[in-house]
Image: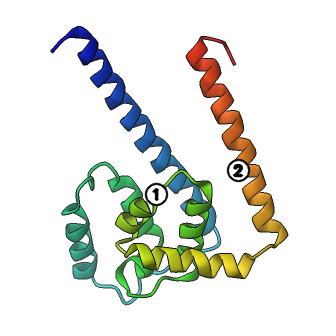
Amino acid sequence: MSEDKSIRKTQEVIQRIAETIRKNALMECIVKGIAEDGKEEAEGITAQQIIDLIRDYLKQEGAERDASVFLTLLANFPKSMVAHNLTPQAKATIAATYWTEEVSMEDMARWFKRSKSTISEAIRQVSNTLSNTETEQEFKSEWREYRKKAEADKEKQASGEKF
């Protein structure tokens, strides 16, 4: 392998790692913020259900890359993760994650062990509840500003400027 190819391959690996870390950190912040109001209790869930869920999750492609997100979700939303129905906190987490535009439907479907249509329905339900409220608009506006600043910082860093 030529030196240029090796450098490009290394850069690609570093970019994938950075993207994974960013997604994981984002999800952990969102989950902790929503779970602050109260984590779901694990009452009524068996150890076997949790083990089966973890085993099933680990069979997925890319599971090792996102394991910390999955475990964070499982620790905070055990009923939603095991049961058929999502709790309001889990739906709020899905919607908040979607609005950040950092995470794909495929990622969320994999993390929550749900179909993309279930993820989409959860987003729709939360959006309808918040529809055109000040809170939703503020969140989206603040997030757009954050993304613009992050992009500007990234460009400065790439050009060698200090920020």
From what the image shows, is residue 15 above or below residue 47?
above
From what the image shows, is residue 39 above or below residue 58?
below
Residue 45, located in which quarter of the rendered image?
bottom left
Residue 21 x/y as whole percent: 44, 41
Disc 2 versus disc 1: nearer the observer:
1
Residue 111 x/y as whole percent: 38, 64
Q: Residue at x 51, y 74 (%)?
A: 120
Q: Are marks 2 and 1 in contact (CB under 8 Å)?
A: no
From what the image shows, is residue 75 above or below residue 18?
below
Using residue 137 as the reference point, say whether residue 3 is left or right of it.
left
Q: Residue at x 37, y 75 (%)?
A: 114
Q: Which residue is mark 2?
A: 143
Residue 135, located in which quarter of the rendered image?
bottom right
Nearest to N terminus: mark 2 or mark 1: 1
Q: Residue at x 37, y 36 (%)?
A: 17
Quadrant (top left, top right, bottom left, bottom right) of the N terminus = top left
Residue 99 x/y as whole percent: 62, 60
Q: Which mark is residue 104?
A: 1
Residue 64 x/y as whole percent: 26, 51
The three-letter code of the residue at mark 1 reads: Ser
